[in-house]
Amino acid sequence: MSLEHLSIAQARKGLLNKEFSVRELTAYYLAKITRQNKILNAFISVAEEEALKTAALLDQKIATKQSLGELFGIPCGIKDLLLVKGQTATAGSKILADYQAVYDAEVVRRLKASDAVILGKNNCDEFAMGSSNETSAFGPVKNPWNLERVSGGSSGGSAVAVAADQCLFSIGTDTGGSIRQPASFCGVVGFKPTYGRVSRRGIIAMTSSLDQAGPIARTVEDAAEIFRVIAGQDTGDATTVNSPLPDLGDLAKSIRGLKIGLPKEYFNSGADAEAELAVKNAIEIFSKMGAEIKEVSLPRTSYGLAVYYILMPAEVSSNLARYDGLRYAHQAETARDLEEIYKLTRGHGFGREVKRRLLIGAYVLSAGQKDAYFAQAKKAQKLLAQDYANVFKEVDILLSPTTPAPAFKLDEKFNDPLTMYLADIYTVAVNIAGLCALSAPAGLTSSGLPLGLQLIGAPFKEEVILRAAYHYQHARSFPNCPFE
Amino acid sequence: MLSSEEVKKLASLVKISLTPEESDSLQKDVSSIVGYISKLQELKLADELITDDSAVDLVGLRSDWVIGIPIAEAKNLIKQAPRSEDNLISTKPIFNRAPRGTSG
């Protein structure tokens, strides 16, 4: 049996039928990473020894007929923003280049308990701040569909690793689109659960009120399966909710009568013609399946990005205060006293995008500006959430392009941060309003670049978008990434 | 446009050293972003009524609480610090910094 481009279900079948062992499957992905990483740079570190050791233990488990976890023998990558005990946790930053995690993130603990095999840590934008993976201190990640293009970000390494068949899935994080946008750029499925579904314990914080981990996978079924493993309340994260997990048992259940909303403001905002066409094609597919399509209005959509770029840097400036040169591995050697330790360590350790956001955060929270920016943004956030709540009284899900355009060229927007931020226009409001959303592959442009379709759901209605995405995925074919 | 003095003040607030080149380019970047986010001032929020509390609750900040961690884990955390002494993180002097170029 070929090991190329397997889904989790196919890999599980092969393992249970003894067509290949966990060790063979793990070795296949490790070899691919070794071969491709110099070009794609999707992994910052690879835990080869540990992964093979785990694989051998799991093979023993199946040989001795022990009970097997839900993700038994499934090799995965982990965005380097999550702690994996004993492995480096860099967050894509020079300031944490030598930092070793001393405990597992709750998501990682759950994956290990479900018998998944962790291959290593995926490259990402520094502290998850970026939309192109170019801010990583460990170099940019290249898009396997076109090596001159960005992977997207901030979970760029995760999306590329899945697209290039270096692992069966990866865990990313999404604060304003960081799972969905790279998934869209790389032609894979990216799923951001509702805030509060998945524990943030052991995830290096960027914007605590918006950050949420989720899967990047090859299929919707795979994403649903991973979600089932990682979701649930955690006493180590007080913001996780005690809400029952949705029933994901029958994604194939008909979507006849599903009410789909098209926010009119999303279609007058300068998206590429090909990105809009992909959504129109999806509308046709859903209509044929018996879904009801309806235009809806989200009147304050155009303010979403401004709200995000106030709230996010405000929390960034607070969360990153902990990198003081005292508690973590890196400290500026030339510093002579405490004040210099702070300033020089942070000055040397942080990259330009992080510094940019720290300054904006300090500005919007400063005594003279707080009411005009931060307080105003908090109020606007409530109104945006209210707009969505009103729309979800009329429809079950919303559709939009995931991004206004396919992957852009490396360096094209790197020195123009505002243009880079505008690439997040369709994704940020989902986080601000506390919703769930998924990006599914929606076709290729005429130049062969993937496009994504975003399905947005009401809070804690993950099963509705997963079911709709499942039907969409099965109604149209999408090619595997040809990169070898 | 933010002045270079304002950028220096912000850098001092967030405790980062900036090279002159960084300072110049960040002055330009931050000014352009502040210009963009200022569009939020157009939104007349005082006139808006927030009627749906359930939507508001979903995005309200919720508090974290502290849980204990095993001693061994705490020791390992301290080992990650660049300097430690007797299981405590240590630092260079906090007070009495001598100006650069002088001794004592």
Image (tube, coloured by chain):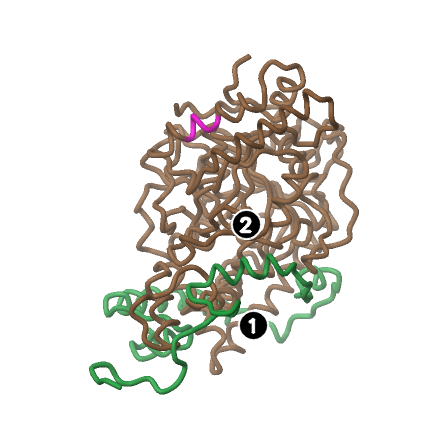
Is residue B72 shown above or below A150?
below
Is residue B54 shown above or below A33?
below
Color used for chain A? Answer: brown
Most distant residue in the front direction: B86
Count the marks. Answer: 2
Residue A231 in which image quadrant:
top right
Instruction: Give the side of residue A2 with respect to residue B31, left or right.
Output: right
Q: Main secondary structure of the magenta part?
A: helix
Who is closer to the viewer here, A417 or A376? A417
- Say what amino acid the circle numbered 2 marks: Leu
**Residue A273 drawn at (x, y percent):** 44, 37
**Residue B48 drawn at (x, y percent):** 65, 70
Residue A45 in which image quadrant:
top left
Disc 2 sits on a residue from what chain? A
Report the residue marked by disc 1: A376
Report the residue marked by disc 2: A83
Disc 1 sits on a residue from what chain? A
